[in-house]
Amino acid sequence: MGISIVDALSIVGKVKYDDPALASLSTPLAISVAAGLAAIGAARMRGSLRYYGTSRKAAMIALALLLSLVKAAMVWSAVNLIAGPYVEVERQANLTAGGNVYEANVSVVVILVDVSKSMARPMGNATRMGIAVDVACGLAEQLFREGARVHMALFADYVVRSLDYAGSCDDVKPETTYNYTTLREAVAYAASFLEKLEAPGTIVVVSDGEDNFPARDREGYLRDTALLALSANATVIGIWVGEDPTSLVTLRSIATPTGGLVVRPGEDWKPAVRQALLIVEGRAAVQQRPATETVKDYETPRKAFLSILWILMLLVLLVGPW
């Protein structure tokens, strides 16, 4: 079975069970079997023992007792095997979300890119949308190169498209703009994604900040949006590609309560990327999940009990008949 009897016995001592109640019956059941087989053997040998000398009688009795114990041990092993034995082991932890696997000791970043109609407005020699995509893709490329797991989403009043960044922005660039902006929906999506990973992360919002929030409860709306990020243990970084100072305040009202801030790209968007990158790296260095997790290993104890059973069966075959 690929495991020695010494190793098998060592493993058995560390075993836990899916059905501990059944496992607890293995020892009394084995004792009952041993006693029953010993009684049956004694009854069978009672008449024949008078024909043998003392030494031969002792040898036959010892052999009968040995066979009884071996068979009882087989019953004990079989019952424990049925009870679902396992050992707890430590292994490299992984995070999963959407069918993708992420190592636990890397930073996770969700980049949200605003693709609402206001993003089509000109900004310098480009459009807000063009600058936003350049910044988002530049940041994603840098993070990806340094080993981070990057998830990107295009949003307007809903999440238009989402994908895991794998080294190319070809599928990120939008063909058109969509309706209006709802920052809360975008942050809620990112927070939900991070919660599935059960890991702290960073939410980067690349937007002009012109949110269509309810005017009658602006403060409550922004507070609730920040709380969504905090509930996922996430820091929000805003990259502002707008012009209206009010929209800058909007992004800051979401980022600041989470421990984040808002940066603004100029004609050269690379400094903003570097600043955002430093924030992400600093957070990842402070908040990381343990690199290991405890899991149940069923295969090792299964091999151990099967090895014991094979050896006991071999003893029965070698020592005598059933």
Image: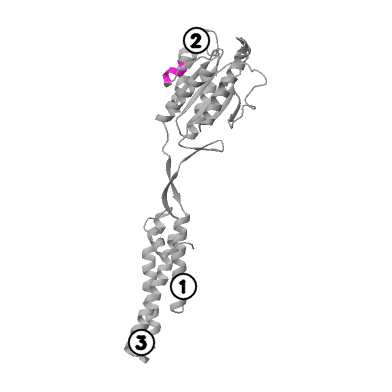
Amino acid type indicated by mark 1: Leu
Q: Which residue is mark 1?
A: 314
Task: Look at the image and give the residue range highlighted in magenta.
Answer: 253-257
Which SS class for mark 2? helix
Q: Is residue 313 above or below residue 244?
A: below
Q: Is residue 137 above or below residue 307?
A: above
The mark nearer the N terminus, 2 or 3, is 3
Amino acid type indicated by mark 3: Arg
Q: Nearer the viewer, mark 1 or mark 3?
A: 1
Q: Which residue is mark 2?
A: 216
Amino acid type indicated by mark 2: Arg
Whether residues under marks 1 and 3 lie with C-beta atoms below 8 angstroms apart, the answer is no
Q: Is residue 114 above or below residue 10?
A: above
Q: Which residue is mark 3?
A: 56
Which label number is shown at residue 143? none
* Residue 159 rendering spot, x and y as whole percentages: 59, 24
Q: Along the horizontal axis of the image, is 125 left or right of 240?
A: right
On whether residue 32 falls in the magenta region, the answer is no
Disc 1 crowd rating (10 Å Cα; few below 14, some 14-19, many 20+) is few
